[in-house]
Amino acid sequence: MDYRKDVNMAVYEYAEAFTNLLQQKYAKDLCSDALTKSNPGVKFINSKTIKLPRMTVSGYKDHTRTPGFNAGTMSNDYEAKVLAHDRDIEFWVDPMDIDETNLTLSVANIQNTFETEQAIPEKDSYRFSKLYTELNTFSGRISTDTITAANFLEMFDTEMSYMDEAGVPEEGRMLYVTPTMKKIVKEAEGLQRVMSVTTPSTINRNVHSLDDVTIKMVPASRMKTKYNFTDGCVAAADAKQINFILIHTSCVVCRDKYSYIKLFTPGTDSRTADGYLYQNRNYGDLFLLEKKVEGCVINAEAAEA
């Protein structure tokens, strides 16, 4: 694997080298990865500000069959949003833990452990909790009804109907569920089931979609309404459980703006001494588009009064 080296400072830059590997890992392990694929045309104003479109156009008027057309109105402004989730960490690594014949492999092992145990769970946790906060801010649909196998399908149909009435596209809707909620979905009354038997000893009862809505299971620990990011990512003391999120990804803008991964070799400066210094920084955020708030519905535990 290629990497760039500054021969004067003995600093190895790995952000570019690991881009493809991280994208593959995110696609597999990051539950919220689909949210980053929406609205690719939304641009950054500068290094930390993204502009969210707010276009409004007027409708038709009767044509009089005389020269000229009726004048319409169009507003094509945008709302500037500043990315707020700017995170970093560094580790001092003993030289005995580094394979000097293959630094890239050693850093990849550190990176993989960090992404698996810290970065990926935090990304999901931040994005889902931020989505809850934004939906609450814009007075979107947040249900606190208790869901059981007896009422899930009726509740699901009701929420789907609200989206249909609001003109939310049918194709592309996703249902994020906790493991407990997925069990309820599998047991839902009124749901027709087809079991796939591939061998005499293998029966597949997984539910991957419902009415063409893709179902994605998310660990319950990543679906809380609020988190404390002081040291890593932990659920806040007053956090409530999010049970499911029904969403069309077009209603959000989710971006990682900046990624920085470097390794400083022994003796680079006074901090490294005889060891290696690994640094990692990631900067991004998620925003709900106010004009598309109907594209998201959340069911969660009721917040305390």
Image (cartoon, grey):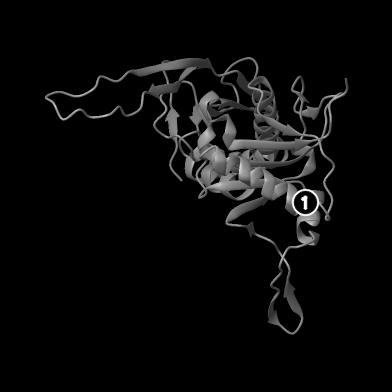
Q: Nearer the viewer, residue 76 or 257?
A: 76
Q: Residue 296 lies in what quarter of the image?
A: top right
In the image, farthest residue toward the bottom? 200
Looking at the image, residue 107 sits to the left or right of residue 125; the answer is left
Q: Nearer the viewer, residue 187 or 32?
A: 187
Question: What number of labels is visible?
Answer: 1
Q: Is residue 197 above or below residue 113?
A: below
Looking at the image, residue 83 sits to the left or right of residue 207; the answer is left
Image coords of residue 147 (percent x, y): 82, 46
Residue type, label 1: Phe
Image coords of residue 118 (percent x, y): 71, 35
Mark 1 Cα within 10 Å, few/some/many (few <14, many 20+)? many
Q: Nearer the viewer, residue 223 or 283?
A: 223
In the image, farthest residue toward the left? 67
Q: Is residue 217 visible?
A: no
Which residue occupies 74% across, 85% down?
200
Which residue occupies 13% across, 26% down?
66
Image coords of residue 11 (percent x, y): 51, 26
Q: Is residue 113 visible?
A: yes
Image coords of residue 79 (percent x, y): 47, 16
Q: Is residue 218 above or below residue 294?
A: below
Which quadrant would the C terminus be assigned to in this image?
top right
Q: Residue 125 lies in what quarter of the image?
A: top right
Q: Is residue 219 above or below residue 58?
A: below
Residue tagged by mark 1? Answer: 152
Identify the secondary structure beneath mark 1: helix
